[in-house]
Image (cartoon, coloured by chain):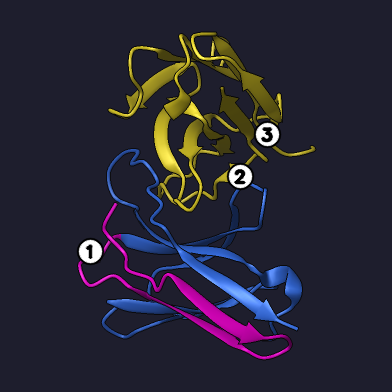
Chain colours: A yellow, B blue
Amino acid sequence: DTGVSQDPRHKITKRGQNVTFRCDPISEHNRLYWYRQTLGQGPEFLTYFQNEAQLEKSRLLSDRFSAERPKGSFSTLEIQRTEQGDSAMYLCASSPFKGLNTGELFFGEGSRLTVL
Amino acid sequence: DAKTTQPNSMESNEEEPVHLPCNHSTISGTDYIHWYRQLPSQGPEYVIHGLTSNVNNRMASLAIAEDRKSSTLILHRATLRDAAVYYCILRDSSGGYQKVTFGTGTKLQVIP
């Protein structure tokens, strides 16, 4: 198992374009999370999946953002009509379900988005 | 998740111990204390977690105050590779899922 994989690692796009990021979690991890991180800040929670169900979305996730996890395995995060304020590192994490809700989160290396 | 307070930055000399403090005065009885760190240009990685007793693993030790309102992450011999942002997080073990919330953490600088 090679850990959480994210693709692409870097994306430069022009304002108004759509971008999609993919996350492949550690196999058999049924929980998957997306975070966004800007320079000097900690990761901000965006959304959470348990298997294929999206169970929580942050208010940070505007209508231009959509995330899916169609078969409970990989996930995609799409940003439509990108804005310069969307420039950030997008982090994906996965974890196995543990009954005490304290399972370790395993993060990918992130996808860095630059909107020109 | 309950709120934690950490210093913005700390410095340590290489090969010396480092004590990274975290205050969590509103911690509840079911909150676990977790530490993650984030190396430059990487995603965060898990370091250690505990509930009441002090904990040790290959990366670090976690010392938890008796009243649980504060904790300290201890790196026994800092190396240059330990230069990172360290996040102290509380995770409620009761009930269903709760999101993991990161603060701004402590940026540790290790001086050669």
Q: Which residue is mark 2?
A: A106
- Name the residue: 40% across, 20% down: A54
Q: Which sits in the foreground, A47 or B68? A: A47
Residue B6 forms part of the magenta stretch: yes
Q: How far from the left and from the top, in percent, is residue A108?
A: 65, 39
Q: How far from the left and from the top, in percent, is residue B36?
A: 54, 59
Q: How far from the left and from the top, in percent, is residue B66?
A: 31, 85
Q: CA distance from mark 1 to mark 3?
A: 31 Å
Q: CA distance from mark 2 to mark 3?
A: 8 Å
**Residue type beneath disc 1:** Ser
Q: Which residue is mark 1?
A: B28
- Name the residue: 44% across, 51% down: A41
Q: Please report, as a chain letter, where disc 2 is located.
A: A
Q: Which residue is mark 3?
A: A26
Q: How many C-alpha atoms fall within 10 Å of the one at disc 3: few (<14), some, or many (≥20)? A: many
Q: Please report, as a chain letter, where disc 1 is located.
A: B
Q: CA distance from mark 1 to mark 2?
A: 25 Å
Query: For the magenta stretch, what is the residue range?
Result: B1-30
Label 3 near label 2: C-beta < 8 Å?
Answer: yes
Q: Nearer the viewer, mark 1 or mark 2?
A: 2
- Name the residue: 33% across, 41% down: B98
Q: Residue furthest left?
A: B26
